Image (spheres, helix red, strand yellow):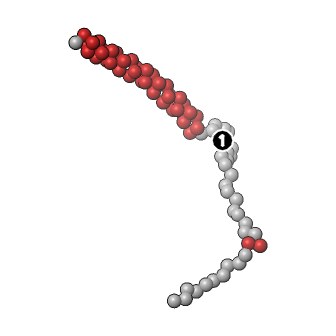
Amino acid sequence: MKFLLVFILILIILSWFFRMIMGYFARNFFNINGQANRQKTQPKTGKRGDVHIDKQPARDKKIKDNVGEYVDYEEIK
């Protein structure tokens, strides 16, 4: 009986301790991620009228002349 009481008491203490530790890590993790996301989404400040390009558009691919030609076909039944 004494063993069971001590075992339950240890489980209660460990669960409380685990909840405190995980709460600390979760808060720390979400604060770090929140700061990183805010830095990414904040607009870049500059003078009025300045143009800022984040990335260049993809260029059109040109077809080479030696690729071949298109052959039209008909389905025969």
Q: Is residue 8 left or right of residue 56?
A: left
Which residue occupies the extreme top position in the image?
2
Residue at the image position 67 percent from the left and 49 percent from the top: 55
- Disc 1 is placed on an element classified as loop
**Quadrant hosting residue 46:** top right
Give how far across and how far down residue 70 sits, in percent.
67, 79
Give how far across and how far down residue 39 sits, in percent.
58, 34
Which residue occupies the extreme right position in the image?
66
Residue at mark 1: 48
Q: How many marks?
A: 1
**Quadrant hosting residue 48:** top right
Task: Identify whether 63 is placed above or below 58.
Answer: below
Q: Is residue 1 left or right of residue 61?
A: left
Q: Nearer the viewer, residue 48 or 26?
A: 26
Give how far across and how far down residue 75 sits, in percent.
55, 86
- Residue type highlighted by circle 1: Arg
Task: Identify whether 76 is placed above or below 40.
Answer: below
Residue at the image position 25 percent from the left and 10 percent from the top: 2
Task: Identify whether 28 is placed above or below 41.
Answer: above
Binning the other alpha carbons within 10 Å of mark 1 as few (below 14), some (14 to 19) or many (20 upward) gives few
Q: Nearer the viewer, residue 46 or 63?
A: 63
Q: Is residue 41 visible?
A: yes
Q: Is residue 42 left or right of residue 19?
A: right
Give how far across and how far down residue 71 sits, in percent.
66, 81
Q: Nearer the viewer, residue 2 or 28?
A: 2
Task: Identify whether 18 is placed above or below 55.
Answer: above
Residue at the image position 72 percent from the left and 69 percent from the top: 63
Q: Nearer the viewer, residue 13 or 27?
A: 13
